[in-house]
Image (tube, rainbow, N blue to C red):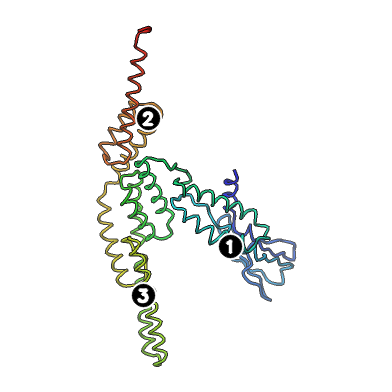
Amino acid sequence: MHKLLLLGLLGLPLTTWGTESIELQDGTKVEGKILSISSESVVMEVQTTPTIRGEKTYPRADVAKIRRASQDDIAFEEVAAVVVPSTADDPAVYDALLEQKVRPFMKNYAYSKHMPEARRLAATLEEERNRVASGETKVDGEWVPADASPADRVEIQGRVQLAKMKEAEDPATALIAFEILEKKSNTSSSYPESVELALEKIGQLRPQLTRVRANLERRTKEQEQGLKLASEDRRRQMELGIEQEKAAIQAQIDRAKQAGSKWLPLLPDPKVLDGLANLADSEEARLEKIDTETLASGAEAVRRAGEQLHNGDLDGARASLDEAQKLWSQHVLLASLKESLKKAEAEVAAQAKAEAKPSGS
């Protein structure tokens, strides 16, 4: 129950935690976040609709009272923005939230009126972190036990990586998650949808490549022009700065390569941009050849078979598994479901035999 309460609290606008306000001369109270105060006006960020916030300016002469948020109110806004992960397979996800957001607030503002909320959030994150560390996996809000079978693990990891693709803020990150999914879970039910999503992300990547390349070319020309016009001392300083910038970019490239992904981050480097453009073309051509519609139908037949087995509909399960075999013979759950069907049929046969046996014999 406390978890549901916390999630509900986390969904509130940030101004609920560190609300600032002004009172106008006519008694009207306006709540929001004060952006600036001058002798002429007060500029505030206010909630114009349940989902949209915008700036609004009030003449200083119309403002009778101003209430600023305290330092802990402001600091808690960052904590209040923390969302408990809906999908997690690594304790590091929780460690980052705890160490970078929640615990620093609790240490620095132990006196704050927001401490009860901060403690509840910390307790939830710590509890879930321990569950993941013990082998459980959280997928779309559902917990999968640590003792899942190898086949179920493949299915689970497919769901995890697909969720990461959907949650990714940029195409490159989503494509890295797809690469992991394709290497480890390309026989899972998530694979057909992940292929379609990867194609969509490749389409989103292209305009970003164009934009980064244009910015790089513009910046390079500006640097070249600046070097021509600069004095000797200034030129040396500029050249040193350019070299340091290139070294920092190369360090990022090296770290990305060490991680093992073919999808490098969008960095202002000609070789990186050319490589990503070529990779986008080749991957798009390859993925477009995958019959995702047939695979999705096979995955649906597998899902239906599992449900029918659970409900005791063995004839229906047999028909669904036959359909799945034709559509997607490599689906990771197909073999285990066939085995489950075989056992269920044997149990039914044994029970029928026992019931048919004459009494007293």
Q: Any mark on residue 216, and which?
A: 3
State how far apart marks 1 and 3 are (Cα): 38 Å
Identified by mark 3, the residue type is: Leu
Are dots 3 and 2 in contact, CB under 8 Å?
no
Element at badge 1?
A: helix
Q: Is residue 295 above or below residue 27?
A: above
Quadrant of the image containing the N terminus:
top right
Residue at the image point whose x is 43% and y is 43% from the top: 146
Residue 248 figure quarter = bottom left
Q: Is residue 299 above or below residue 223?
A: above
Residue at the image point whose x is 36% and y is 44% from the top: 155
Q: Which residue is mark 2?
A: 309
Residue at the image point whose x is 49% and y is 47% from the top: 131
State how far apart marks 1 and 2 are (Cα): 50 Å
Q: Earlier in the sequence, mark 3 or mark 2?
A: 3
Element at badge 3?
A: helix
Identified by mark 2, the residue type is: Leu
Residue at the image point whose x is 36% and y is 34% from the top: 304
